[in-house]
Image: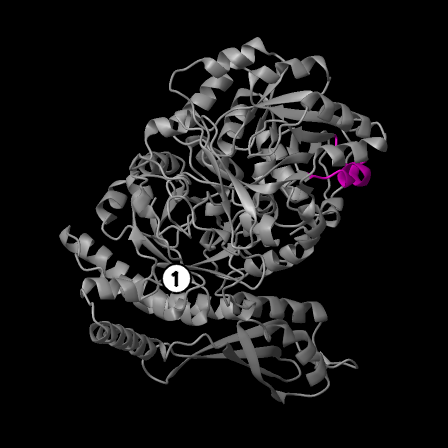
Amino acid sequence: MSRKIELLAPGGDVEAIKAAIVAGANAVYCGLDTFNARNRAANLSFDDLCGILRLAHQFDCEVFLTINVVILEQELPALFKLLNQLVNTSLDGIIVQDLGLFNLVKKHFPTLDIHASTQLTTHNEGQILFLNKIGASRVNLSRELNLPEIASLTALAHQHDMLTEVFVHGSLCIAFSGQCYSSSVSVGNSGNRGRCSQACRDEYEETAAGNKYPLNLKDNSAYFDLPELVEAQVDSLKIEGRIKGAHYVYTVVDSWRKQINQFVETGKLLDDDSNLYKVFNRDFTNSFLKGNLTKGMFIDNPRDNSVNHAIEQKNAISVVQIQEVRQNLRADKNELGASLEQKIQHLNIDKMSLTLTFSGTEGSPLTIKAGVTAKSNQLTESTESNEFTLHSDTKLRKSDMPLCADVLEKRFRSFNDSNYIIQEYDFNQLAENLSIPFKELTSLKNRLAFLLNDSVEVIAPVEPPKLIQAEKVEDSPKLSLLISDEKDAHLCDVTKADIYFKLPESFKKGCNKYIELLQRNPRFIPWFPAVLIGKDYIEAVRILEQVKPKRIVSNNTGVAYKAFEMGIDWIAGPFLNTTNSYALLTMQEELNCSGAFISNEINRMQIRNIKRPAGFKLLYSIYHPILMMTSRQCFFQQTVGCNKPSIEDGCMLKCEKATTITNVKGISFAVDKQKGGYPSIYNDEQFLNLDAIKDFSDLFDEFFIDLTDIGSGSKAKLDKIQLIEHFENLLKGDEDAVSQLNTMVTLSTNAQYQQGL
């Protein structure tokens, strides 16, 4: 395995990719105008991608394509079409979020290299093993991790021939990637579909701590942490910024390239990072990397900080001084821009010109000469040429169905494609009324395709296999519920429903509290959270090993992998963002998963076509608090304030603050911190979807309700026994239960079920 330090650059459009290449990137990641988590970037057409591949590879730069969104069932034919195209390019890898893609690629497109996106929230050892099992060759580790955590996971990845990459520069999300639903909930634009509207950058009513942008983090920069990243043996240093322009990409990549080169050559660092402040930034922090989560990570301004930084550096006070700083900064930016323009002006991604010449006489082979001409990417206007010559095995003979111009053009026009543009067909040297068998003509075409594809066999297209809807596991849908407090154990006496017990995100090391609780309450089915880092993952595994439950629900793929190893029946929780049949197949076939919650982000039409595998349960939540985001940072530092300068080890276990934040539209959101939990923000409305029972009793085996009180904010606590009774009556067909539930749950919505992704 290579230990080269890869500098991985963003490319939101063609010009930005050219900028990354000339600045010294070892690899670029970019997206097409579909299946891509940066739909606000300009992105590429497929023709652009093919041109970028030719250009980048001339400069020994790899290209990774982002297919880093969840996939909907009705999109699978279009996805197959794209994958059929990608396998016949020189693409170096695809970046994937959806678990279904792992199954598809492994079975049908094994030549494609899969990288696990940051949207998969990878932060513990079990998740590395999970991703290795389903086919990932590298993983983008969660941005929230610190250096020791990164080093530990990288060492494990290397043991399994996987590479790791870490974001080292650019925007930071306040929420765990892949676990943020704020944009989806508030305006219907899901981050899991690349449509994040950045609610974390929004203005809110001024908080008690005096902040109007209480969720707005500074940008990430590990510029001076390079030695520690090298020591941690991270393989790829990733720069964020696919919605940034070419000027930004060039400046940041160039700065990092010089820093890496300096360190490799001398073992020392450059101490000047001034150019990084001359392009868009919100000031910089490396606090996640250092594990020092302070108030200093935030900035109460989501806009460009470059001018403010320059003014502070020059200590400009007067109007004249400030104006001079602005002018100098503008001049520096213009100079950098002019330098970039000069460097990329001769780079092109134009299609290669193809001339096809057909020749032959009676009794001789059919000869095809393919002349390829491409513009040079050097500092001249020159061109580069190549020529291939092929001969038929059989001889041309007289025929009543001759190889006329129309027939040959029709046969060979497919070469007018993403890589080539046919400039000319030349038939002047081909005698008339001659032919060869059409199967030989097809053979010639295939041989030419091989040569024009860099002597790589062209892979035939794969048709999507027809999936069958297997029978339900349960004859009629059951009710299940979630609790988080042993005080609710009495609910076991009033219902036969499955009772899941929500475990926290943090545990006291070596404490047997939850082991003993689960052993006391054999009806409780452990429910594991989405995020379990470091010792909290180890303690979660210890619970599995000590309790040995028959069944669990896991929202964390690391715990899921451990359950698979131990032979424990496991169900994929709702925060695994399952939206299609192939995701179900990945989990069942690779990790013996027995059921899954279907994502609450998708609507009835998007749910309808999902096909269950045989013997596989489908579950759906019809009542729960709507999580908007979860963070490793502290929401209370910027809202109600906190006397602690930074988050301490005990904060997770001890703190149980709660408050609200209110946006400028007057909508309030509950900020909740349970003991043992990460700070989270919830919508003001509860999710209540009674329509799903009517729509999908023939599809779902289990309808789920959340009775934990987590995220309820200041809302009145409801009678849980009464809620269970109404939901059970609804499943039995009692129409009165609808009005009774709507009366009880006064502030609710099922907007996501209506709008979908």
The residue most toward the bottom is 428
Residue at 24% across, 47% down: 225
The amino acid pointed to by label 1 is Arg
- Residue 326 pos. (x, y %): 27, 73
- Residue 28 pos. (x, y %): 40, 60
Horizontal relation, residue 192 to residue 621: left or right: left
Residue at 38% across, 16% down: 510
The N terminus is located in which quarter? top left
Residue at 41% across, 65% down: 244
- On the image, which quarter does residue 567 sit in? top right
Which of these two is toward me, 530 or 127? 530
The answer to whether residue 756 is above or below residue 277 is above
Q: Is 690 within the magenta? A: yes
Horizontal relation, residue 240 to residue 354: left or right: left
- Residue 601 pos. (x, y %): 64, 45
The answer to whether residue 453 is above or below residue 501 is below
- On the image, which quarter does residue 538 sit in? top left
Residue bounds of the magenta highlight: 688-701
Classed neighbour count for the residue bearing mark 1: other residues with Cα under 10 Å, few (<14), some (14–19), many (≥20)? few
- Please name the residue that numbered disc 1 is placed on: 303
Residue 233 visible within the image: no
Q: What element carries label 1?
A: loop
The residue most toward the top is 520
The answer to whether residue 340 is above or below residue 537 is below
- Residue 10 pos. (x, y %): 41, 60
